[in-house]
Amino acid sequence: MSDETRVLLADIGGTNARFALADPGAASPLIVDSIHGFAVADFPSLADAARHYLRETGQQEAGIARGVFAVAGRVDGDEARITNHPWVISRPRLQAQLGFERVSLVNDFAAQAMAIPLLQAGDVVQIGGPSWTPEAAPRHRTYAILGPGTGLGVGGLVIREGRQYPLETEGGHVSFPPGTPEELAILDRLSAQFGRVSNERLVCGPGLVNIHRALSEIAGEDPGPMQPADITARAQAGDPRCMRTVDVFCAVFGAISGDLVLTLGAWDGVFLTGGLVPKMLDALQHSGFRQRFEHKGRFSPNMARVPSMAVLHPHAGLLGSAAFARCNAPETAPA
């Protein structure tokens, strides 16, 4: 592999930016030992962070001419805004700043979706329901993917005749649909605070805090300032309200995951990713996630046949960006 064939990858979230290199011609296109992560708050722009990575890794003079950047926000033409961070990314300006011949911007969960066909058995853990078996070259599949981190990302992957079509969505901002009297009471408290309440207000790191505060207010108590890590740690230590917070979080996560399967027709599986999933894996496996996932009235028998898998690959966004780079590699002119 020459340096000129390498592609610069980035997976940009609301908190962290991860960079790597890809070899689009390889069976496993992500070059794992090239991965480096930085806090987005440490850089004024994506271009500054990318240049820092290239300098730090000695790649600045390597002749890299392409970039694929997955961003946690909507990609609107040549521009993307990070939903939970003030970066605004212009594709033409970024391309000029880096001196690249080609730059692609893709929604981060479209990239996560592109990673699905590259996942191996050890990269996923079953969350109830049937198992899922990786396929070397799937021909006709529809998958859903969603995951909580700083926010709630949602996407999908449609595979037809072996061609992959990632779906770029902002499904985390769909209105929250309460399914129990307790969730109705939580919605009432969150509505008073936010007005409209989206799924992201509950199913993400800050969502844990929102649920805990709402449950505390229902009980007539003020919990004081809390962080997501405080809630999960106290839940593991046996704190009843924090345990209930985690239970509600997992149940709502299951309900909206099932709704996404119904919306996309993703009968081949839903994949749970994002920063919170590995940290809450045991809770998800021993919660009401799967019960609420399947509880879809007349479609409950259909839902019982849909795999729900937690993605434990540590760099699925970069893996999917590498897959995108491979699928969109410039064609080589015939000799």
Image (tube, grey):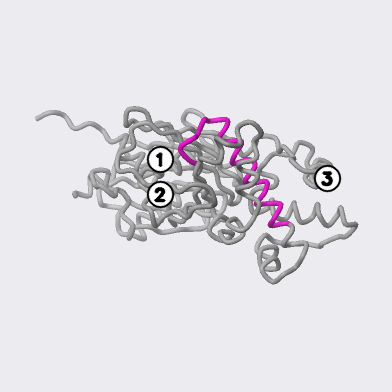
Residue at x 74% of width, y 62% of height = 242
Q: Where is residue 123, by image quadrant?
A: bottom left
The residue to which callout 1 is attached is 114
Task: Count neighbours of disc 1 (C-alpha within 10 A) and say few if under 14, some if 14 to 19, many if 20 or more.
Answer: many
Residue 318: assigned label? 2
Task: For residue 45, say whether it is visible.
Answer: no
Give yes or no for contact between labels 2 and 3 (Cβ–Cβ under 8 Å).
no
Task: Select label 2 or label 1 by which is in front.
Answer: 1
Ranked by sequence position, the earlier of labels 2 and 1 is 1
Q: What residue type is labelled 2?
A: Leu
Q: Name the side, left or right, on which 93 lies relative to 64.
A: right
Task: Say what amino acid the circle numbered 1 marks.
Answer: Met
Q: Residue 185 carries which label?
A: 3
CA gap, disc 2 and disc 1: 10 Å
Indicate yes or no whether the magenta region holds residue 257.
yes
- Tell whether 231 sits left or right of 335: right
Say if mark 3 contacts mark 1, CB within 8 Å: no
Q: Quarter holding the C terminus?
A: top left
